[in-house]
Image (spheres, helix red, strand yellow):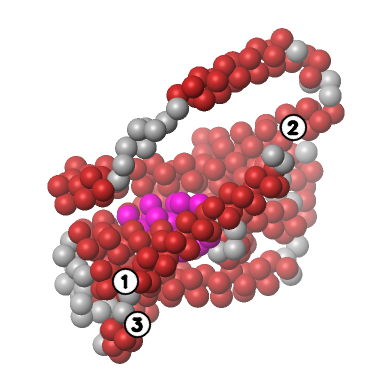
Amino acid sequence: MNKRLKSTLLYLVGAALGASLLYLALAKADFAELWQMMGQARWLPLIGALVVVVLSHWLRAWRWSQLLDASGYPVPTERTFAALMFGYLVNYAVPRLGEVSRCSVLIKTNRTPIATSAGTVVTERLIDVITLALFLGAILLTELQTLAGFFTAASNPLENLNFTYLYLLAAILVLLGLFLIRFRKRLMRLNAVQKLAAFLSKLVSGLLSIRHLGRPVLFGILSVGIWGGYVLSTWLFLQAFPQTEGASLWFAIILNTMGAVGMALPVPGGLGPFHAAITYTMVLYGFTETQGANIALVMHTSQLVLNILMGAVGYGYLLFQQPSAAEIAASEAGE
């Protein structure tokens, strides 16, 4: 199976999964009740939630700038913000392609090698995964009895796993490793291998850029601020409607964490998994499926429209940006 066909099939599977989950979520929504709910909405916390979302994105762009600066390719925060929003825009069409897209645009605007910027993005994502794992751990420790419905309803993923394929994969990897060790000198003479090695070297350099941060305390504050902003925006969304305005900040943490898990699935824009995660988490905490589905629709749709608009504006802004003399010099020195 060639690479393009495999990517297409994976995209179709993800899109089908998202469409199925979105259908199930929308089936629980009551649009008449949703319209009534919007009529009762308190617009100050609703607008505040969207403002906090934008600020969280800005903090993420600022943090990304810190990593790029540490890797030797400084990029102003306004450009990383525009690139980040463009990446979110692309993700609504093809999941995970946005991460590549936001790195690609920095080649034109700042002469930042894609391998280096990709390495910093991977570092970012690792930090986010660790943060999400910490949130999940805290929630499971305190809310295990309430969330048990998720685990009892799910089948054991290892139940039907054929370990023969895992053993075969392990054997292939071992043989491949031995082959590379045995013929490494001959392989390194090949032009393609040398280019691959150079690319991997820059990728690793981007990954390890966190070791060279000029202001590690600021980096930590930004990381806390990003996730704090996500939680605060979720809480403000809940405060905007009479049906959920009494929700606690802890419940907002739970809801934000479960929604983040849904967004992490390889589905365009989290369409479906996010709605399902929000809906059924709210059901576990005493809300109706209709209320959960309506809140999920409001949260996701408002952010989708906001991100699409900012992504389009961000891309337009980047079209007119050119690298400075210092950025060109840094690029040439790193080549």
Question: Disc 3 marks which amino acid?
Answer: Phe
How far apart marks 2 and 3 lie (CA) works out to 53 Å
Report the front residue among 117 and 19: 19
- The answer to whether 163 is drawn above or below residue 115 in the figure is above
* Side of 236 where 185 appears, left or right: right
Q: How many marks?
A: 3
Query: Which residue is at the front of the view, 331 or 300?
Result: 300
Q: Is residue 244 magenta?
A: no
Location of residue 177 in the rendering, given as x and y in whole percent from the top left corner: 63, 17
Could you tell me which quadrant the N terminus lies in?
Answer: top right
Query: Does residue 265 belong to the magenta stretch?
Result: yes
Rendered residue at 45%/27% (across/down): 162
Circles 2 and 3, Cβ within 8 Å, touching? The answer is no
Q: Secondary structure at mark 1?
A: helix
Q: Pick the quarter of the image with the C terminus.
A: top right
Q: Is residue 19 left or right of residue 36?
A: right
> From this viewpoint, is residue 25 visible?
yes
Q: Is residue 33 above or below residue 5?
A: below
| Element type at mark 3 | helix
Q: Which residue lies at the image location 49% right of the left edge and 46% below the top edge?
A: 125
Q: Which residue is mark 1?
A: 28
Identify the residue shown where x is 31% and y is 86%. Answer: 32
Q: What residue span does the magenta drawing correspond to?
A: 258-272
Check disc 2 and report its element: helix, strand or loop: helix
* Tag of residue 196: 2
256 lies above or below 170 = below
Q: Which residue is mark 3?
A: 31
